[in-house]
Image (cartoon, rainbow, N blue to C red):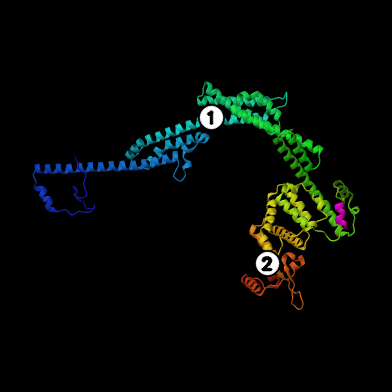
Amino acid sequence: MPRVPTYDTPTVAPQPLPGAQMTDSSHLMQWATLGSQEQRQFGNAVQGVGKELAQIAADQQATINEAAVKDQHAQLVSTVSDILHGSQDNPASGYMTQAGKNAIDGYTGVRDALTQLPDKMASNLQNPRQQEMFKQAAAQTVQAAITQASVHAATQTQKYEIEASAARGQAAGDAAVKSFNPMPGADNTLYQQNLDTQRAELENQADKFGLVDKERAEYIRQGLASTYVGVINHLASNDQIKAAKAYMATVQDDIDAKTQDKIRAVLEAGDTKNDALALAIDIKSRIGGIAAQEKELDQQFKDGTINADVHDMALQKLRADNSQRRSEQAEADKAVIGQVWDLKNKKPGATLADLSPQTIAYVKQRGLGSHIDSILAGGPAVDDAKLYNDMMRMSADDPVGFTKLDLSTMSGQLSQSHWNHLVGMQTSINRQDTKAMEANKLQHDTIAGVKANLLAAGFNLSPKPGASQSKDLEQFETNLRDRLVQATQDKGNALSQDEARSIALGMLKDQTLAGTGIGGFFQSHAPVWKMTPEQINAPWVVPPADKQQITDALKAKGRPVTDDAIQAIYKAKQLKGK
């Protein structure tokens, strides 16, 4: 057999590069002197070497062909994998990841792409032998891939058919729920058609699943039962409890016992709701005022004529109605009493008769005459700090009780701004305005949280009623509430706890007014909470250290250094308790 040449002991000597060669005449002479037998032996030897070289070349080409085919087949396997299972960067692009209708629609394209791969990739090979070998190997790989894709398509076709059937059945069931008419003698043809469609789809699904006998019957029963339950819930949610009970009686045999128990609980709750609503309507028609209404409700419960559920639901209804009525009434009161204050400011000495006929009629209807007279006949605006603070504390501690108050009775005892704020807070609570209620609670907690600072500032936290110390404490709380409300409005958002506390501490700071006293001496000073609005807005004495610090800060920011700028920054720091 011919031997493949090795690198360490080559059997074929290196050949010179092609080109013109010089012939040694001595070699020719030796050839000429050989005998005919020797010449034949030499020729045979040369011929054997040629055959051996040819075989070596053939073996080399076969090796090259095999390597090229393997390389191309590896690329084919990778391409097939990407088509079926997606690439590493995009796994979702693989056909085997497609489901339902997407898999069905994509099968033809995948099959065609796989079928074309052998011929398409064979064109990349160098000779017919490589192409033939590649196609033979590729055919098996591609056929296996097509088979896998076909199985997936068949599986997804069945799955899609079942999903489509389920979707149609569900849509029919939903339509049946909405189309059922509980009125006696009503035409329920559409309801029955939808129910029949759902039944047909359930039977089709049972066939696909291979269900028979009891399993088949149970599958269909459960599917229809979901629609029956849907009809009952739909009726109950629309307060048609009697209709729901009547329908339940006709279909209950097709609903399992556990679900029946749940439905009956829902229907009983619906009965309770209806009873509570009827009771609330009856009480409102006979008794005025939420306090008296609640008393009547409590008495009926004590007498045993209603149970706890009816009592609680009726109470919620009465309170909700009262809150709505109170909210609307408070807004109307606010508008009318606002007109009264405007009249007082524009026309001192005005009386109730100076109001418009419509306003007078409302005042009489609401019984506000004495309160209106107290506003018009009074001197400067009255503002009971204790009453205001008591009401604000109640709005935070007992919001339900606060909403029951008739604030119009306090209109002559408070300033317009404070009375308006109380009305606004009551309206916010009635409407469950969480943002406003949280801001109110923060203000309440801030005042309670600075008790130690109040003691340090000299406040008596348990003064005798009516004493000057009691008035000071109430006035501080009133002024602080006003500052917190204003700061919240200026910020446009709720204050943080730290922001609210710093404002409270700033109110306790003692400040000296500039330009007061004799010759600049003995300048007046007071804590901020005692200052009038005019004094707060007037110039304050800025200590030298603070003035220098503010001046340096203004210069560093490239802003002009003026007395007004220094005053504004100093006051802002002091009022924030910094």
Q: Nearer the viewer, residue 331 or 447?
A: 447
Badge 2 density bin: few <14, some 14–19, many ≥20, Cα 10 Å: some
The quadrant holding residue 341 is bottom right
Helix, strand or loop at label 2? It is helix
Residue 356 can be seen, yes or no: yes
Q: Nearer the viewer, residue 224 or 166?
A: 224
Count of number-bearing discs: 2
Disc 1 + disc 2, Cβ < 8 Å: no
Q: Residue 45: percent from the left, percent from the top?
A: 15, 43
Mark 1 or mark 2, which is nearer to you? 2
Measured along the vertical axis of the image, is residue 316 above or below residue 548? above
Q: Residue 56: percent from the left, percent from the top?
A: 23, 43
Residue 172 can be seen, yes or no: no
Question: What residue is pinned by disc 2?
Answer: 574
Furthest-front residue in this view: 464
Residue drawn at x 40%, y 35% is: 142
Q: Is residue 381 left or right of residue 510?
A: right
The quadrant holding residue 135 is top left
Question: What residue is pinned by disc 1?
Answer: 162
Helix, strand or loop at label 1? It is helix
Q: Is residue 312 left or right of residue 18?
A: right
Looking at the rendering, the stretch of residues picked out in magenta corresponds to 370-377
The three-letter amino acid code for the residue at tag 2 is: Gln
Residue drawn at x 14%, y 54% is: 24
The quadrant holding residue 482 is bottom right
Q: Quadrant of the N terminus?
A: top left
